[in-house]
Image: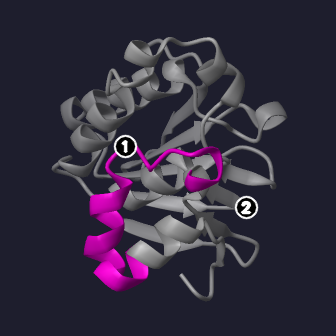
Amino acid sequence: MELQHFLTEVRGDGIGVFTINRPEARNALNSACWDDIAAITRFIRANDHIRIAVFTGSGDKAFAAGADIQGLRDRTMIAALGGAAQAALKELAACDKPVIAAVNGYALGGGCELAMACDIRIASDNAKFGLPEVGIGILPGAGGTQRLAGLVGLGRAKELILTGRHISADEA
């Protein structure tokens, strides 16, 4: 499996650890990252040695600080709406093995949506969650609106999505 922005480790105890490795960009998710996530999910499903998968981010500042804004600027509207992120997270959420998000630092936008697509979220004390897309005039586009409502209820989901407010690990 060839990945562009993830480090992988399959430990002897059956745990697969998949680390977003773009610390210079606070692990911002670009189109290659979404392709990597889809490939990792297929790898997890096909690998009998992996019993549990863990997603995390490199460095201590961010799990994934959202979309790579530079990458968004370089895309056409049709390409931006292509659905690679949503498809990757739908596939991850349907994985038949447990998937854990080990959240360190910021989990914003697509990073928050990645964490929500996992079965369990374990957050460090410095973790911050949020869907700040409203600040640039868009809504979460990778299934976050539906997943958040399912996790915290419709009223709280609307509040968080419409305000773009970040929340701490304790509040989450």
| Horizontal arrangement in the rendering, residue 46 relative to residue 77 (left or right) | left
Residue that lies at the very extreme toward the bottom in this rendered image: 170
Residue 23: percent from left, percent from top: 78, 37
Q: Residues within 10 Å of mark 1 (few under 14, many from 20)?
A: many
Would residue 29 be visible to someone looking at this image?
yes
| Cα distance in 3D space between marks 2 and 1 | 20 Å
Using a 10 Å C-alpha cutoff, classify the residue at mark 2 as few (fewer than 14 neighbours), some (14 to 19) or many (20 or more): many
Dividing the image into 4 quarters, which one contains the N terminus?
Answer: top left
| Along the line of sight, the residue nearer the viewer: 77 or 65 | 77
**What residue is shown with label 1?**
142
Q: Secondary structure at mark 1?
A: loop
Q: Taking 171 as reference, is 119 above or below it?
A: above
Residue visible at 46% across and 57% down?
A: 115
Give me the residue at 50% from left, 44% from top: 138
Q: Nearer the viewer, residue 145 or 52?
A: 145
Amino acid type, mark 2: Gly
Question: For numbered disc 2, what is the local secondary structure?
Answer: loop
In this picture, which residue range is highlighted in magenta? 134-157
User: Image height check: is 151 above or below 62?
Assistant: below
Asked if residue 145 is among those painted magenta in the image, a careful observer would answer yes
Question: Measured from the top left, where is residue 132 in percent x and y?
Answer: 61, 57
- Labelled disc at residue 105: 2
Report which quarter residue 89 is drawn in. Answer: top left
Which residue occupies the extreme front position in the image?
Answer: 137
Mark 2 or 1: the one toward you: 1
Number of numbered callouts drawn: 2
